[in-house]
Amino acid sequence: MSETRQITVTVNGTAHTAEVEPRTTLADFLRHQLELTGTHLGCEHGVCGACTILFDGYSTRACLMLAVQTDGHAITTVEGLAGKDGTLAPIQAAFQKHHGLQCGFCTPGMLMTLTELLRDQPNATEEEVRDVLSGNLCRCTGYSGIVDAAMEVLAQQRGKGA
């Protein structure tokens, strides 16, 4: 019989209480117990960035964190970016406009990484965008559309005085 621990974690604004095995990764918890499959598993070693989520607002690799570590904390996954009415977040809409996705496998991790950047560095340069994205691997897009999307949202934010 395997030992379990009870955790309470807020995911995308909703509190969840669950029993988890101590060695269950956050990525597996999100995908299998909460059925939030937008958090993708690529390398399972923290290298590719496909599993990036926001942990208390900061980008974190869900494959490297244990679910028990999230007890009492807040997680945002890609499913939490769009509005309750389905309206895309500005970065999601910009990805669509600039063809910042192709196969879509890396897209959730890219979106989560950029969400933190857009919030914390509203004056980021293209070089800074490319630097922050260097931890998220993409085999399809060549990154141009992704960078263009981020730059458009940053320009929009600056235009609004954000």
Image: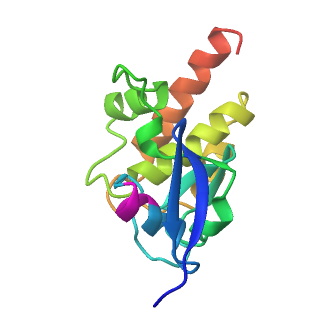
Residue at 47%, 31% in the rendered image: 91
- Is 31 included in the stretch rendered in magenta? yes
Residue 126 in view, yes or no: no
Q: Can you name the residue that lies furthest to the bottom here?
A: 1
Instruction: Magenta stretch: give its range.
Output: 30-34
- Is 118 included in the stretch rendered in magenta? no
How are the residues colored? rainbow
Left or right, residue 142 beside residue 47: left
Name the residue nearer the viewer: 34 or 44. Answer: 34
Q: Can you name the residue that lies furthest to the front here?
A: 1
Residue at 58%, 38% in the rendered image: 115
As displayed, is residue 14 above or below residue 53? above
Q: Residue 82: x, y in percent?
A: 42, 29
Name the residue nearer the viewer: 47 or 86. Answer: 86
As displayed, is residue 90 above or below residue 26? above
Q: Residue 107: x, y in percent?
A: 39, 50
**What is the count of numbered marks?**
0
Q: Quadrant of the rendered structure where residue 87 is?
A: top left
Residue at 60%, 53% in the rendered image: 8
- Which quadrant would the C terminus be assigned to in this image? top right
Residue 112 in view, yes or no: yes
Residue at 48%, 53% in the rendered image: 109
Q: Can you name the residue that lies furthest to the top here?
A: 160
Q: Quadrant of the rendered structure where residue 155 is?
A: top right
Q: Residue 52: x, y in percent?
A: 53, 57
As displayed, is residue 83 above or below residue 23? above
Q: Residue 142: x, y in percent?
A: 39, 54
Left or right, residue 154 beside residue 89: right
Left or right, residue 50 beside residue 5: left
